[in-house]
Image: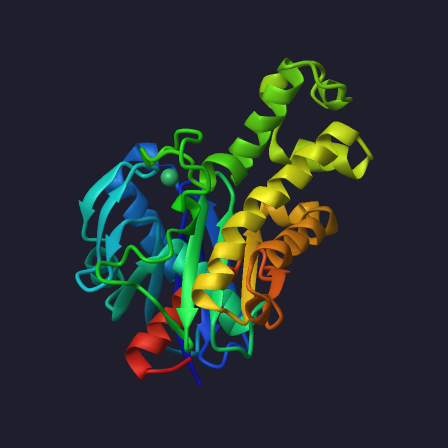
Amino acid sequence: MRYVVGIDLGGTNIVVGTVAEDGSELVGLVSEPTLPEQGGDAVIGRIVKLARASMAAARGREISGVGIGSPGPLDTKTGVVILTPNLGWVNMPLRDRVADGLKLPTVLDNDANCAIYGEWWRGAAQGVSHVVGLTIGTGIGGGIILGGEIYHGASDVAGEIGHMTIEANGRVCKCGNQGCLEAYASGPAIAARAVEGIEAGAKTALRQYVAGDLSRITAQVVYEAANDGDAFALDVVHETAKLLGAGVASIVNIFNPNVVVICGGVTQAGEQLFGPLTSEVHHRAFKPAWEVCRIVPGTLTGTAGVYGAAAVFMQRTWGAC
Ligand SMILES: [Zn+2]
C-alpha cells in the first residue's frame, strides 16, 4: 500500500496528514498555526516540519508524494501561488519549495478544490460523478468535480462560487465586485446582516448573547440564538438559506450535479438552514436537475483538505484515487 502526504494550508492553520492510497487510513495528523505575519520562509519551514512529523508518525509505510491545498489564485501547472492576500504572498513557488524541502514529488491545487475533492473521495459526496461544493467560513470557496476530476477551467480560476453575483447592485465584496454570494452568506457577512438588523431596531435577545457588545456577534452566535428560538436570529438564518438557495439553484441548473456539498461552520445551523435552502433550490431550479441532486453538509470536519490534497496527488500522478 502506498501513502501520500496531504497538506491543507490555510490563513489560520496548517493541517497535515499521511493518507493511504485507498483512503482507509489517515495517520500522523498534525497541525500548527500558520502565523503568516512571520513571512513566507517561516510558513514554508513550518509546512516542511509538519510534513516530516506526519511522515515520522507513518514510519514503515511507503510514501509516494505530497499534495498541497493552498489559497489562490494559483497555477497548478507551474505550482506557483500567484496571489494570496491572507498570507501576503505574490508569485510564491510553493510546490517546488516544499518538494525541495521534502525530496518528494509534489502537486499543488486550490484549497477549496481540495476540500471538495476530499468530500467526494472519502466524505459526504462519495460514489457519484458530478459534485459541486462550497466551503463557507470567513469567505466562500468552491470546487467543481465533473466525472470524478476537478474542473479547473482555462486558467485555474473555475469554482469561485463565492464570487457568483446574486444581486447586481448589491453589497461590495472583498474581490471588488458587487453583490457576490460571499458578501451575503460568509460567516462575517451573516454577522454583519444581523448587526444591521439590530441597529435598525429589531426585537431580539441577540444583544444578551454578547453582553451588549455587537462587535462580538458571529454567525455561530446567530445560529445559537436561532436554536434557542429567537425569531430575529431565525429570520437571519432563513434569509441566509434563501440567498444561498439562489446561488445553489444556479449551480444546480448549470452543472446538474448529483450532490451539492456544503462545508464549514455554517453547517452547524443544521436543518434550520438546510431545510429552507433545499426548498429554495426546488422553488428556483429545473425539476429534472433538483430531483437527482442531494444537498448535504460535509462530513470530514477538519480533514477534508488533507484527504483532498492527497487525492489530487494520486489523481494527477496515477490517474485515479
Ligand atoms: Zn466577490
Image coordinates for residue 50, horizontal then vertical, percent = 40, 55
Residue 306 appears in the picture as rendered: no
Tell me if 187 is positioned left or right of 148 in this view.
right
In percent of width and height, residue 215 lies at 58, 19
Q: Please tell me in which quarter of the rendered image ligand 1 is found.
A: top left
Q: Position of residue 266 (x, y in %)?
A: 61, 45
Q: Which residue is painted at 54% across and 48% down in the image?
A: 246
Query: Which quadrant would the N terminus be assigned to in this image?
Result: bottom left
- Nearest the viewer among 5 and 58 is 5
Q: Residue at x 41, y 78 (%)?
A: 147
The quadrant of the rendering that contains the C terminus is: bottom left
Q: Quick check: 29 above or below 170?
A: below
Residue for point 63% across, 55% down: 283
Question: How are the residues colored?
Answer: rainbow
Q: Is residue 108 visible?
A: yes
In the rendered image, residue 275, in percent from the top left (x then y), is placed at 71, 53
Left or right, 127 with respect to 51, comes to right
- Number of numbered discs: 0
The residue located at (42%, 76%) in the rendering is 148
- Position of residue 40 relative to residue 116, above or below, is above
